[in-house]
Amino acid sequence: MPILYGGTKSSDFVTPGIYIEEQVPTSPEKPGGYTSNLLAIIGVFEKGPLTEPVIVNGLNDFVEKCGNFTENYSGSKAAYAALQRGVQKLAIINVRGDMAKQAEITLLDKEGKPTLAVRHMHKCEFGNFCSVEVQAGNKPDTFRVILRNPYGKPEVYNDLSTPAQAVEKVAAHSKDFVVEELAQEVQPGSNPDVLAETKLTGGSDGKPTKAADYLGKDDPVTYKKTGLKLLKTLPQVTDFVADKNISDQFSDAMLVAAQEMNAFTYIPVPDASIVGAISMRQNYDTEFGHFVLGQAKSKSKGWVVPAAVYDAIAHVLCPVQDGTAGFWFGDIESTDIPLTTADIENLTANQVVCLSWIVNEKRENAMALQSDFTLAADARLRQTYRRRVNSLIVRDLEMVTTPYRSKHLSDGWFAQYEIAVRHYLDKLKGRPDDLNSEVIQDYKISFRRPGEIGNVDEAIEELRIKLFNIADKITIRLMSAADLTA
């Protein structure tokens, strides 16, 4: 469902009043459930495509698709922090600097002529650790190709009769390699000659990454995107963070992208000082992100990761309506900036998030986030959970109403549509016996009738949500919402 931000009075809110109890019909169907949070990390990983996002589920899946967790790759360190703490699913956006190259090897036939090129699928130094071996096949006049990478099982392509067949089989099954036929004319004897296991060469991670690599490109010919531009093709992402501080330009772009995607982002403070963080914070005014001070060192690996990454992890794992109070990190050994109580109060007053020691429910020292404010200048927009509940409702309404998009705008269609929307909103109010199910306190909604609309996105005229602990209502700014100035 399209979202509308802005307008001459977009920041106006209405103070609580008297609600009229609306009778809601019982829903005959169960529409889409609550969206699950999805964290995206933009960074440098050992391997992986540059023009496609990678969805990973758990540590093993990450290693298979994105390479190992090593000190050399800041993206891998950020991903490890997330997966180790309990995040089950990540969206990975891999970036590379200029001059990144694929590792490759040319296979020769018995006459020493080029017949096949074997390349690692991605531009990365990792390809240099991969290898190829050619053996005779089990059948006459056939060959066997064995492709290996350090972390997976060997890929064995047996009884190949022609180079073209090798190209076809590898393209259909390999997750790490591509093969190209080089022979100008296919003739008997053009099959690759026997070759002992040999490593590919020439793979490179390229020059050090810069802001332009993280911002990404949009190829006008292939329509392929990279970096932040690629991330914006994933509407299911709810939270995203970079593996390190890049530049002010990139931080600004991240915050703009968060608003465009109705998501939330976490910006590392480049200045490692309290005074510098508070000063730089004044450059921002948005409810779609956090400004996070410091770096954190893990106990298990000794790796240093921006505190912004841990902020993102906490919000992905915590229920949207509950915030991050009481959420702690057992694997953090220390931070680069020790903070006093006065420091924390000063940072909180200036809407800068930080990490500091607490005593958890196990009566152990643990590191936890301090403060949970957005970067909004308007005090009414500083509470993070207001923004995240708003985002949750807009995302879920889009899913709930999807089945009705291709139907005729009849009275029967409208009745079912209204039932589904009201049923979802009633679920957000929770059950009296389950406090964890309470997301909102109340809501008020009005609809346009079928004869007044041209498509499903215009059906909801206005939706106002009353949150717990908030002295005013959220107006969900849908494209179809009535102008608040009216």
Image (tube, rainbow, N blue to C red):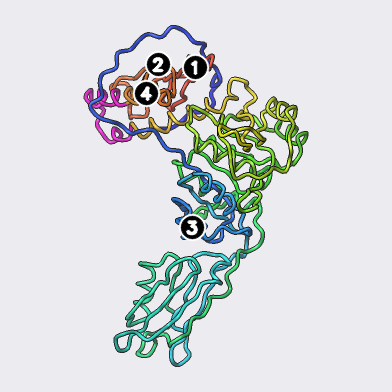
- Report the Cα–Cα distance between label 4 and label 1: 15 Å
- Camera-side mark, 4 or 2: 4
Earlier in the chain: of badge 1 and badge 2, it is 2
Determine whether 61 is above or below 145 in the image.
Answer: above
Please indicate whether residue 387 sits to the left or right of residue 147 in the image: right
Report the disc number at residue 473.
Answer: 1
Confirm or deny contact between disc 1 and disc 2 (CB under 8 A).
yes
- Camera-side mark, 1 or 3: 1
Closest to the observer, 205 or 149: 149
Residue 372 at what x, y percent from top left?
60, 29
What residue did someone put label 4 on? 425
Magenta segment range? 401-420
Q: Residues within 10 Å of mark 4 (few under 14, many from 20)?
A: many
Q: How crowded is mark 1: few (under 14 residues within 10 Å), some or many (20 or more)?
A: many
Residue 423 at what x, y percent from top left?
32, 24
At a point 66% along the width and 47% down the height, the residue shown is 297
Confirm or deny contact between disc 3 and disc 4 (CB under 8 A).
no
What residue did someone put label 2 on? 444
